[in-house]
Image (tube, grey):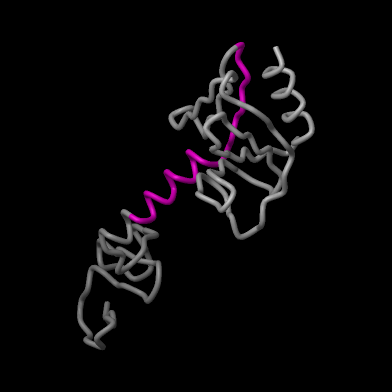
Amino acid sequence: MQHRSKSGETGDKTLQTYPGWLRDYNVDGDSNNNDCLIMGIEGVDNISLAVIIIIGILLVFTSTLTVTIFPDILEVRFGPALLRFKFKLSDIVSCQRVKNKWSYGFGMRNTPHGQLYAASGLEAVEITLKDGKKYRIGTDAPWDLSKAIERAISK
């Protein structure tokens, strides 16, 4: 069976490639029987693949944000608990509900208002430490979180 390659050559070919994502491996040369159909990305180099993998890992680790208040510690965790940030409750001077600008983004960011930890949304609770540093913790329930922190630091 005659196959035409990308370069226009004709002849018996066991591999026919098409532009884009599809590769058709015709092992036995029978044009009526496609033995193997494989989806892949043509032309992806190692750097692009590494960037895609890194972005995927970052998405997994920053897709959820969990805030836990222990008797003496406020803990902020991203994803499956590999990224943790702890604040001593005795170091927290105040907390207030705030709304972040959309341009601050998500994840761990430095903002004009201090470090931001956010997985989604624009609402956050800003805590101020004794040394003057400020941190913003993104939350879907800023009222509840600020009340819980206020109760914990008043003990």
Q: Residue furthest front?
A: 131
Q: Is residue 118 left or right of residue 148?
A: left
Q: Quadrant of the N terminus?
A: bottom left
Front in this rendered view, residue 60 or 120: 120
Q: Is residue 72 left or right of residue 139?
A: left
Residue at 39%, 55% in the rendered image? 52
Choose top left, top right, bottom left or bottom right for residue 88.
top right
For the image, the number of numbered tags is 0
Percent coordinates x, y for residue 112 in the rendering:
56, 53
Q: Which residues are magenta?
A: 51-71
Q: Where residue 45 sits: x, y (%)?
A: 27, 63
Identify the residue shown where x is 32% and y is 57%. Answer: 49
Q: Quadrant of the C terminus?
A: top right
In the image, residue 21 lies in the stretch drawn in magenta: no
Of 93 and 101, the residue lying toward us: 93
Q: Position of residue 37 (x, y in %)?
A: 38, 59
The relative height of residue 148 versus residue 10 in the rendered view (above or below) is above
Residue furthest to the bottom: 8
Residue 101: horizontal and vertical position, in percent? Answer: 66, 56
Is residue 23 positioned above or below 133 on the image?
Answer: below
Residue at position x 23%, y 68% in the image: 14
Q: Is residue 85 left or right of residue 74?
A: left
In depth, the one of 119 and 75 nearer the eye is 75
In the figure, is residue 122 to the left or right of 28? right
